[in-house]
Amino acid sequence: MHIAQLNLVPAPPQIEPGDLPVHWHTLADVADAVASAGVRVSVIQNAAREAAFVRAGVEYRFLPLDGKDGPRRLAAALVGAGAGLAHVHGLDFAPQAHALSKRLPWLPILLQDHANRPPGWWRRAPWRRWYAAAAGVAFTAPALAAPFVEAKLFRPGTRVFAIPESSCRFTPGDRAQARYATGLHGYPCVLWVGHLAAGKDPLAVLDGVALAARRLPDLQLWCAYGNAPMREAVQARIARDPWLAGRVHLLGRVPHEKVELLQRAADIFVAGSRAESCGYAALEAMACGAVPVLTDIPSFRALTGDGRLGRLWPCGDTGRLADALVAMAAAGPTRAEVRAHFDAELSFAAVGRRWAEAYAALLAGRPRAAAWEAA
């Protein structure tokens, strides 16, 4: 089986092509996961300048794909590579997938969700036509497809696959060493990694922590974040509550390599997200063995086996969050049990197998007349 993964977001011109998989680690992660299942993978990346190289057994080709000649170049690259299926990253690239299907009508196309949203109702007619090019679509959880299905954006018969958006290379490491290196402490030591923004609901998390602290006097919360439109509101909430002041530590922006140490040091990873297409920080936490205490949303249900691992709490319900923190501090799964779940369900090998099964299902449904000779 040979598939091509198409990344149509333009590559930053200041980054050398060979370095892009390091800067955009998700570019390589899904490809490497699929390759681990024994599938031959070619990655075609939209870029201002051409390049080609092989990395970890995956073939990369950089091509200029924007502009009037882009569809022809893309179709020629797929025919030249001999790939039997096109995996397009991002539902927003349905127009390009439709153009590709016109040139290569026998080629199965799979579109993968990356936090995409349905178009407004007044724009849906052309999108229905463009989405019709897809033989299959993939979301982290089936419920995430519901807005698209309810809007009748996918044609009848389009396969919907539930596959985690990516995996993670973090490992559990040594917790004591991680705590020494980072300075994190607490019983439990609770970690937050995410923007201080309304969609992540940091104020609800703080309210839940304040309630839990009455029963867990040694609890400490450590917050690493990037964008912080709610920083002042968060700081004010901490300052006025004696159950939070001195207990909540705002770390600010942390380099990605240090996030692994933070995750290793934590007992519990907490999230207040109201929506996620996957939840990379939660994936990273579980890869390191931290117990997930996450909001009860579709992507987190998918990552935790419907809440069998750790604890899910209803969005905004601070009392339920406090109960979850107390319960997981007292009798949560061990780090080894969390990592075992990650290995079985979320690792590169596990995700790769699920992608391979999805590709095989789409290829099995391809019309018999679809052959490379038809090109």
Image (cartoon, helix red, strand yellow):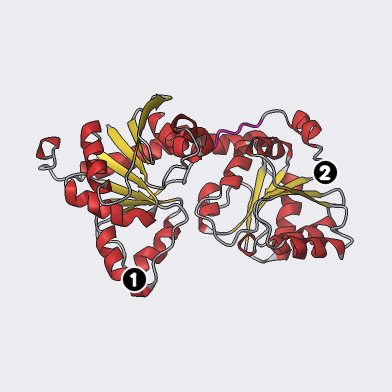
Cβ atoms at labels 2 and 1 below 8 Å apart: no
Q: Taking 145 as reference, is 244 left or right? A: right
Position above or below: 295 against 372: below
Quarter of the figure with the C terminus:
top left
Please name whichever residue, 344 or 186, is drawn nearer the observer in this view of the structure: 186
Quarter of the figure with the N terminus:
top left
Residues packed near mark 1 inside 10 Å, few (<14), some (14 to 19) or many (20 plus) = few
Q: Is residue 9 magenta?
A: no
Residue located 60% across and 62% down the image? 199
Q: Position of residue 143 (x, y in %)?
A: 44, 60
Residue 184 in sight here: yes
The numbered mark at residue 363 is none
The residue sitting at the bottom extreme is 122
Residue 134 in sight here: no
Q: Taking 209 as reference, is 69 left or right? A: left
Residues packed near mark 2 inside 10 Å, few (<14), some (14 to 19) or many (20 plus) = some
Of marks 2 and 1, which one's residue comes earlier in the chain?
A: 1
Which SS class for mark 2?
A: loop
Marks 2, 1: nearer the viewer: 1
Please name whichever residue, 196 or 268, is drawn nearer the observer in this view of the structure: 196
Which SS class for mark 1?
A: helix
- The residue that mark 2 highlights is 186
Please name whichever residue, 103 or 132, is drawn nearer the observer in this view of the structure: 103
Q: Position of residue 258 (x, y in %)?
A: 69, 36
Which residue type does callout 2 highlight? Gly
Looking at the rendering, the stretch of residues picked out in magenta corresponds to 168-172
- The residue that mark 1 highlights is 123
Which residue type does callout 1 highlight? Arg
Q: Position of residue 272 (x, y in %)?
A: 65, 58
Q: Position of residue 215 (x, y in %)?
A: 84, 56
Q: Taking 297 as reference, is 121 left or right? A: left
Predominant secondary structure, magenta span: loop
